[in-house]
């Protein structure tokens, strides 16, 4: 079981949109459940619930496809994803959690909350989030969860 978090990136307010906003994303049950659990946790400790964003989830899915096809769990190209969210959505801050081989949304969230870096992202000063949960050919799940302050 693996999980890791990336340092958050601060947005540059002078960037311009250079890419198209993805407005459609088909969420699977694991994705919806994980988002609900994260929001329930945030609200339980007095934080705002985060708004689901299809473009962010699309960027998460792109990273999951990369991790599955390369058989890795990492934050490769996080800067590129962060820059895209800054440019396209006007993000001021971006954080990312990834995890691998957790069978349930509850298990993935529990692992993130037991890790200081992941917990910091989950409890961070964000307004929106997206997620992708992708199952590979052997049945193992890859999770990418991106948090954004807009």
Image: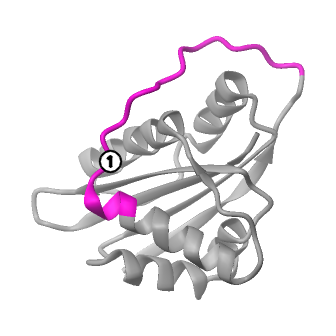
Q: Is residue 12 left or right of residue 53?
A: right
Residue for point 69% across, 66% down: 121
Q: Relative to residue 5, is residue 150 depicted above or below?
A: above
SS state under label 1? loop
- Magenta run includes residue 23: yes
Q: Relative to residue 38, is residue 67 depicted above or below?
A: above
Q: Is residue 61 left or right of residue 5?
A: left
Predominant secondary structure, magenta span: loop
Residue for point 59% across, 83% down: 113
* Location of mark 1 (residue): 27
Residue stretch rendered in magenta on the structure: 14-32
Residue 7 quadrant: bottom right
- Magenta run includes residue 87: no
Q: Is residue 75 left or right of residue 49?
A: left
Q: Relative to residue 134, is residue 42 depicted above or below?
A: below
The image position of residue 63, as x and y in percent, is: 42, 44
Q: Please name the colour scheme applied to the rendered image.
A: one colour
Q: Nearer the viewer, residue 148 or 114?
A: 148
Residue for point 66% across, 74% down: 42
């Amino acid at each position: 079981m693996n999980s890791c978090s990336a340092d958050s990136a601060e947005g540059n307010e002078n960037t311009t949109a250079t890419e198209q906003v993805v407005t459609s994303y088909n969420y699977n049950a694991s994705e919806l459940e994980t988002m609900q659990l994260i929001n329930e946790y945030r609200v339980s400790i007095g934080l705002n619930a985060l708004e689901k964003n299809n473009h962010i989830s699309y960027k998460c899915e792109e990273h999951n496809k990369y991790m599955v096809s390369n058989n890795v769990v990492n934050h490769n190209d996080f800067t590129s994803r962060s820059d895209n969210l800054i440019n396209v959505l006007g993000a001021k801050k971006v954080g990312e959690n990834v995890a691998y081989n957790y069978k349930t949304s509850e298990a993935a969230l529990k692992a993130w909350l037991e890790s200081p870096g992941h917990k910091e992202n989950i409890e961070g000063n964000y307004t929106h989030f997206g997620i992708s949960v992708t199952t590979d050919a052997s049945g193992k799940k890859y999770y990418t969860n991106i948090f954004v302050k807009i």
